[in-house]
Image (tube, rainbow, N blue to C red):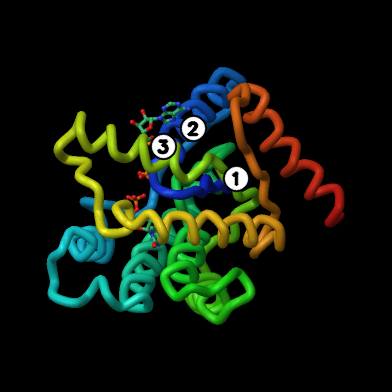
């Protein structure tokens, strides 16, 4: 039985880059690592509809916070059985975004905090009703929103397929989302969080993430 780790953070924070670094570090230690991300573009109709809506398609779909969140949640619902199988077959399953993204962005769009109704709605829908696997550790990659926004902007300039979507263009939303993420981590929403900021050594972080899981097991034993 392996462990399920998620990486969270605002758009352009460097989650995808970090997930590659962690995977290499764990593989160098001889671990079997399976890395994937949500939304599952190209694999899930729900994910693709959400992405298209965030790029201006499908009428007023993107204006509904709960419709967007339901699409993202349905993507994870459809992946839940595979996820459980993958956690059984690998030492580590590492996810670039998971349900906390839905909680943070939905609350931020509604100007709510982590204690608000949207966060609880996401938790109840995804973990209680859809029974998606609970992450062992949720890593929050905490970089200044301005830095993350600049990275997303320059990525767009270099790669036409990475044109920024509605959420990425909304600076105020990104700031509010970062705030909700801080609150989710402080409240250990759903499971333990590890907050990472500034410059860090990826190999050390890889070890810390696994240690946190071990410490958690000792506490609950
Ligand atoms: N530590 C870093 N220093 C400088 N640039 C970085 C760093 N990490 C990532 N980048 C660059 O910033 C951009 C965004 O990184 P990445 O795609 O990993 O972010 P992300 O959080 O996965 O983004 P999104 O959620 O929008 O998909 C990329 O062009 C990447 O090369
Ligand atoms: C998984 C997920 C994502 N979002 C938001 C976060 C981003 O702004 C967009 C698209 O994700 P990407 O990583 O930039 O491709 O959607 C969300 O609100 N809820 C979710 O569950």
Mark 3–mark 1 Cα distance, whole angstroms, equals 12 Å
Q: Residue at x 52, y 60 (%)?
A: 100
Position above or below: 56 against 163: below
Residue pointed to by mark 1: 139
Separation of marks 1 and 2 at Cα, in angstroms: 10 Å
Let me know if residue 35 appears in the view.
Answer: no
In x, y percent, where is residue 14? Answer: 44, 36
Give the x, y percent position of residue 13. Answer: 45, 40
- Specify the quarter for ligand 1: top left
Task: Say if mark 1 contacts mark 2, CB within 8 Å.
Answer: yes
Q: CA distance from mark 3 to mark 2?
A: 5 Å
Q: From the Cβ of disc 2, is ligand 1 less than 8 Å away?
A: yes
Left or right: residue 121 compared with residue 207: left
Whether label 3 touches label 2, CB < 8 Å: yes
Up/down of 103 relative to 148, above or below: below
Sequence-first disc among 1 and 2: 2
Q: Secondary structure at mark 2?
A: helix
Establish whether ligand 1 lies closer than 8 Å to the Cβ of label 3.
yes
State the residue position of label 3: 16
Residue with the mark numbered 2 = 18
Viewport quadrant of the C terminus:
bottom right
What element does badge 1 sit on?
strand
């Amino acid at each position: 039985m392996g462990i399920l780790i998620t990486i969270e953070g605002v758009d352009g924070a460097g989650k995808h880059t970090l997930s590659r670094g962690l995977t290499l570090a764990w593989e160098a230690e001889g671990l079997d690592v399976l890395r994937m991300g949500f939304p599952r573009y190209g694999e899930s109709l729900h994910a693709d509809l959400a992405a298209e809506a965030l790029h201006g398609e499908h009428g007023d779909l993107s204006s509904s916070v709960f419709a967007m969140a339901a699409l993202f949640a349905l993507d994870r619902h459809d992946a839940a059985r595979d996820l459980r199988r993958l956690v059984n077959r690998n030492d580590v399953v590492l996810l670039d975004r998971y349900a906390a993204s839905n909680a943070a962005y939905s609350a931020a769009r509604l100007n709510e905090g982590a204690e608000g109704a949207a966060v609880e709605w996401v938790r109840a829908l995804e973990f209680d009703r859809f029974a998606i696997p609970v992450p062992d550790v949720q890593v929050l990659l905490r970089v200044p929103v301005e830095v993350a926004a600049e990275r997303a902007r320059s990525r767009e300039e270099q790669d036409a397929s990475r044109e920024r979507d509605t959420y990425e263009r909304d600076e105020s939303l990104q700031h509010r989302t970062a705030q909700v993420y801080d609150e989710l981590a402080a409240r250990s929403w759903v499971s333990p969080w590890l907050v990472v900021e500034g410059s860090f050594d990826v190999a050390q972080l890889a070890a810390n993430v696994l240690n946190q899981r071990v410490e958690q097991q000792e506490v609950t034993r």
